[in-house]
Amino acid sequence: MKKINTSKDNIRFVNICLDNGVDFLVMGGTAVFFYGCRKGKGLNDLDLMPSTSPENAARLMTALKQAGVSTNKFTVEELQQPKQRVCLKPPNYNYDVDILMPWAEWLYAEFRGRSEIARIGPAAVRVLSKCDLIITKECAVNDLESDAVMCPDKAGMLKAKAEKHREDLTCLRRTEGSTLVRVNGKS
């Protein structure tokens, strides 16, 4: 089983989530690293996509509280809504974790069914499949490019983020075995 290196604080957060039965997938740059498209020994930034079922959202809220996260800025109901984001970053937290709720058009159960298994610290975790990672990265690029048009004062930063996603996409597509599957009519 392939190991994903991240900070001790992020490993602690993952273990708290798993101890509370939170169902999530590793995605983003950490998943890109898992598939060999980023170099180095590991990443401090960890992106997690949880299931948005009511039961899982309640377990996630419990885990967040146990991890010392101030939960007065969001509700269990908001943890069930598409495209919500909970950012656990310095200086407010020792973690470097983004919790990203799936978009409405993404079927979490299907993503989970196609996921790979890896290890973070002592725990087995699920990583978004390469094909599904490509889909999420494509959606992120489209969103960032649209936001750059709508927010000209932030266009430079948004375009730079979109470019990083495009670099990831180029690598993911050229690595062996990156055949695409159709998800909700999109490939």
Image (tube, rainbow, N blue to C red):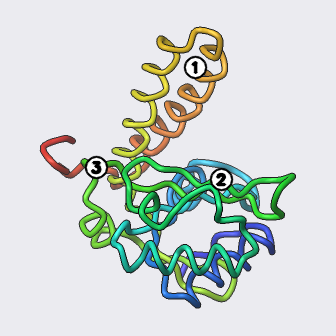
How packed mark 1 is, by other alpha carbons closer than 10 Å (few <14, some 14-19, many 20 or more), is some
Callout 1 amino acid: Lys
Q: Nearer the viewer, mark 1 or mark 2?
A: 2
Mark with earlier residue (1, 2): 2
Kindly identify the amino acid type of the residue bearing the numbered disc 2.
Cys
Label 3 sits on a secondary structure element that is: loop
Quarter in which the C terminus is drawn: top left
**Residue at 65% from the left image edge and 61% from the top image edge:** 72
Residue 136 against residue 161 in the figure, above or below: below
Type of amino acid at the residue the image marks with label 3 = Ala
Q: Residue at x 87, y 52 (%)?
A: 91
Which residue lies under the disc numbered 2? Answer: 87
* Residue placed most toward the observer, 107 or 122: 107
Q: Element type at marker 2?
A: strand
Where is residue 27 shown, x and y percent of the image? 50, 57
Q: What residue is shown at x 45% (from left), y 38% (from top)?
A: 169
Q: Which mark is residue 17?
A: none
Residue situated in front as seen by the camera: 1 or 137? 137
Tell me the residue that label 3 is attached to: 104
Image: 26 above or below 174:
below
The mark that comes first in sequence, 3 or 2, is 2
CA gap, disc 3 and disc 2:
20 Å
Provide residue 15's location: percent of width, then percent of height.
65, 84
Residue 63's image quarter?
bottom right
Residues under numbered marks 3 and 1 in contact, where contact means CB atoms less than 8 Å apart: no
Q: Which mark is residue 159?
A: 1
